Amino acid sequence: MMDMPLPNYNPPTENIYPRVRLMKYLFYDGISPLDEPCPTTEQKLSVLFDPEHPTAPVSPEKGYRIFPQAYVAQAQNIGDTSLRCYMGQTVAKGSYRAELSVIFELTTNVNYESASGYAISRTYAMECALIEALNGVNMNGVGTFYFDRTQHPSCGSWNIDDRGTNLGRRVILGLTWQD
């Protein structure tokens, strides 16, 4: 999802790619994050939550924005945008097959979500980029992501908020796992 470089792969940097758009929405604040350059590898890693240093992000002005677990919080001195990713319900489909759910929570400060001059909801745009980036993608042989309620009853998306300063979308994708 973070689209990092590999020995024979350089990630794209153009806005036509959904992973580029998703990372720009997460990394840049303000009204027009898509007008900014694609974050570098170091910039992407600087906003990934580090459990070894939960109170000392690499970039204190940005803080952590990508949390690969469900229940972690940080104080918010300024508004930001974040993504949480964690496992959800598992549905057994036979002796050797299970349908897993992967939950993504996309949140942003209300000031960014309702910024004037921005034609679409920031978190809805992030949701679209996330689904476009992962739907149908095979995760290193583990299984293929899908957005289909007929395969997993938890698949879907809806509004969420923290009853405070953040609101956004919860997106649940399915993942088929076979032994």
Image (cartoon, rainbow, N blue to C red):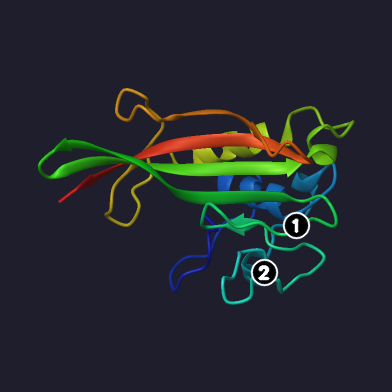
Indicate the amino acid at tag 1.
Pro
Residue 45 at x, y percent in the picture: 62, 68
What residue occupies the far left of the structure in this picture? 95
Residue 22 at x, y percent in the picture: 63, 47
Label 1 residue SS:
loop
Residue 46 numbered mark, or none: 2
Q: How much space separates mark 2 and mark 1, taking CA atoms? A: 16 Å
- Nearest to N terminus: mark 2 or mark 1: 1
Depth check: give the residue in front, 138 or 26.
Answer: 26
Compared across the picture, whether 64 is left or right of 5 comes to: right
Instruction: Identify the residue at image location x=55%, y=60%.
Output: 11
Instruction: Identify the residue at image location x=65%, y=46%.
Output: 21
- Do callouts 2 and 1 mark residues in contact (Cβ within 8 Å)? no
Number of other residues with Cα within 10 Å of mark 1, as a class: few under 14, some 14 to 19, many 20 or more: few
What residue occupies the far right of the structure in this picture? 116
Label 2 residue SS:
helix
Depth check: give the residue in front, 141 or 55.
Answer: 55
Depth check: give the residue in front, 39 or 26.
Answer: 26
Indicate the amino acid at tag 2.
Ser
- Mark 1 highlights which residue? 37
Is residue 134 in view from this perspective? yes
Q: Nearer the viewer, mark 2 or mark 1?
A: 2
